[in-house]
Amino acid sequence: MLKSMILFPEIFSNRPDKFNRLAVWLVNSEGIVCPNIRDVFTAGGQGIIEWKKKQYSRIPQILIKLSNSIDDLKIILDELEIDILEKYWNLSIKNKVNDWLGLINENSKKIKSLNLEEYLKDKFARPQS
């Protein structure tokens, strides 16, 4: 799930086809057939994120899962080769973390109450626990 969050930032969007590339990759690269792929990321509906002593409600579960997995995501992102990321992101990488966070923010424009990019940069800047 975490590697998928990195390779396929479109899963953070509200596009109806956002899981298509992921489903194909799971079958072709990982040998996994998951007919309920959407549920892996979205089960549980919405939740709350607390940041800078403020609570933000109605946050999609996929962003809650991302937030709760920052330390593991840092490790996976660090280990992934730039050419792999460029292939899946279809862009020239300047900085893995900043480029990925930008893609997540770009795909998550539906979050109005929380500055998602600033929040994630803050989470990524903290030392691993």
Image: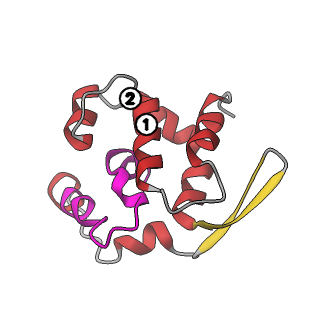
Q: Which residues are magenta?
A: 1-25
Q: Which residue is mark 1?
A: 76
The residue furthest front is: 112
Q: Is residue 42 above or below residue 107?
A: below
* Residue at figure coordinates x 29%, y 71% from the top left: 34
* Residue at figure coordinates x 40%, y 24% from the top left: 95
Nearer to the camera, 21 or 29: 21
Tell me which amino acid carries mark 2. Glu
Residue 54 in the image, given as x and y percentages of width and height: 81, 53
Does residue 69 appear left or right of residue 35 in this picture?
Answer: right
Nearer to the camera, 127 or 104: 104
The residue furthest left is: 28
Nearer to the camera, 94 or 111: 111
Tally the marks. 2
Secondary structure under tag 1 reads helix
Does residue 95 appear left or right of residue 111 in this picture?
Answer: left
Distance Cα–Cα, label 2 vs label 1: 5 Å
Q: Is residue 81 above or below residue 18?
A: above
For the residues bearing labels 2 and 1, Cβ distance under 8 angstroms: yes
Residue 23 in the image, given as x and y percentages of width and height: 24, 64
Work out which quarter of the rendered image holds the N terminus and state it.
bottom left
Quarter location, residue 26: bottom left
Quarter location, residue 124: top right
Does residue 121 appear left or right of residue 80 in this picture?
Answer: right
In terms of secondary structure, what is the magenta stretch mainly? helix
Residue 41 in the image, given as x and y percentages of width and height: 46, 66
Q: Which residue is mark 2?
A: 79
Work out which quarter of the rendered image holds the C terminus and state it.
top right
* Residue at figure coordinates x 19%, y 38% from the top left: 87
Label 2: few (<14), some (14–19) or many (≥20) C-alpha neighbours in 10 Å: few
* Residue at figure coordinates x 53%, y 41% from the top left: 72
Q: Is residue 70 above or below residue 33?
A: above
